[in-house]
Image (tube, rainbow, N blue to C red):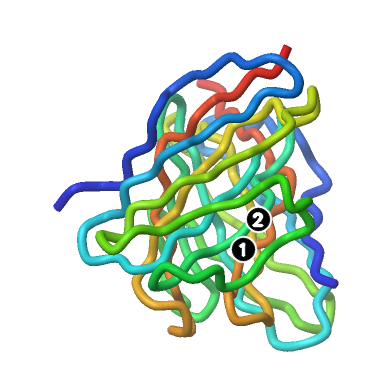
């Protein structure tokens, strides 16, 4: 069984640029959630995708967008990067969306630095 | 709105001593509470969830709805317990997304 993988590991961008982060779900999982973790903070929910549709969104502006593909892999896109977007971005996959105890399996994260 | 508070950013105990990591939450409905752990250079992983009422690696956590708390406890800490611990809540909404606290870094001293 393959765990959640994310790419790239690290990324450096400048303010105003656009970035795409990628995530491969754990085998058999159909739901992907993205989190932003700023330094010294816990992960903060960005959005979730279930069967290629957005299924919930946290308090993030529209310049944060995503995609989920038929193989359940996912992308997080951030436009017009700001300095405050510097963070660790975590992807988590799970099976289905409604089981009461939906354990989410996390990837290692992508460290984004915006200069 | 749902919120999770972990009042201690850092906690140090000696090996063999009891440890308690505090977690308080704010949520109007019936929450699902979790503890996640991140060991050094490893990814975030689930430690335990309140509904399972299980003990994992000697850790237990009881949901106290009156005090809105979900403290993590272990009677005898081990050095390998040193890690970052996050309390998380899953509440309403179709996504059942996790709301995390800011974490407590536990260090178990020899």
> Foreground: B59 or A95?
A95
Total count of labels:
2
- Quarter residue A32 falls in: bottom left
Residue receiving disc 1:
B98
Whether residue A68 appears in this view of the structure is: yes
Residue drawn where x is 67% and y is 23% of the image:
A17
> Foreground: B56 or A24?
A24
- In the displayed structure, would residue B72 be above or below residue B64? above
Residue B91 position in % (x across, y down): 67, 77
Whether residue B14 appears in this view of the structure is: no
> Foreground: A43 or A67?
A67
Left/right of residue B92 with respect to residue B28 in the rendered view? left
- The secondary element bearing badge 2 is classed as strand
Residue drawn where x is 38% and y is 77% of the image:
A96
Where residue A45 is drawn, which disc sits there? Answer: 2
Which chain's residue wears label 2?
Answer: A
């Amino acid at each position: 069984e393959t765990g959640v993988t994310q790419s790239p590991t690290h990324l450096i961008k400048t303010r105003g640029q656009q970035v795409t982060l990628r995530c491969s779900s754990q085998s058999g999982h159909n739901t992907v959630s993205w989190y932003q973790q700023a330094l010294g903070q816990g992960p903060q929910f960005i959005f979730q995708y279930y069967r290629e549709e957005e299924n919930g969104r946290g308090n993030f502006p529209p310049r944060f967008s995503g995609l989920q593909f038929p193989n359940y892999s996912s992308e997080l896109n951030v436009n017009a990067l700001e300095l405050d977007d510097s963070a660790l971005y975590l992807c988590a996959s799970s099976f289905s969306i409604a089981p009461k105890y939906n354990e989410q399996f996390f990837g290692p994260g992508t460290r984004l630095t915006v200069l | 709105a749902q919120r999770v508070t972990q009042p201690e950013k850092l906690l140090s105990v000696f090996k063999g001593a009891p440890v308690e990591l505090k977690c308080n939450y704010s949520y109007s409905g019936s929450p699902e509470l979790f503890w996640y752990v991140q060991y050094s250079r490893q990814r975030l992983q689930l430690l335990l969830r309140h509904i399972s009422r299980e003990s994992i690696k000697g850790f237990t956590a009881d949901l106290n709805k009156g005090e809105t708390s979900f403290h993590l406890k272990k009677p005898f800490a081990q050095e390998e317990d040193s890690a970052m611990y996050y309390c998380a809540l899953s509440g309403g909404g179709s996504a059942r997304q996790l709301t995390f606290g800011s974490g407590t870094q536990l260090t178990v001293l020899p």
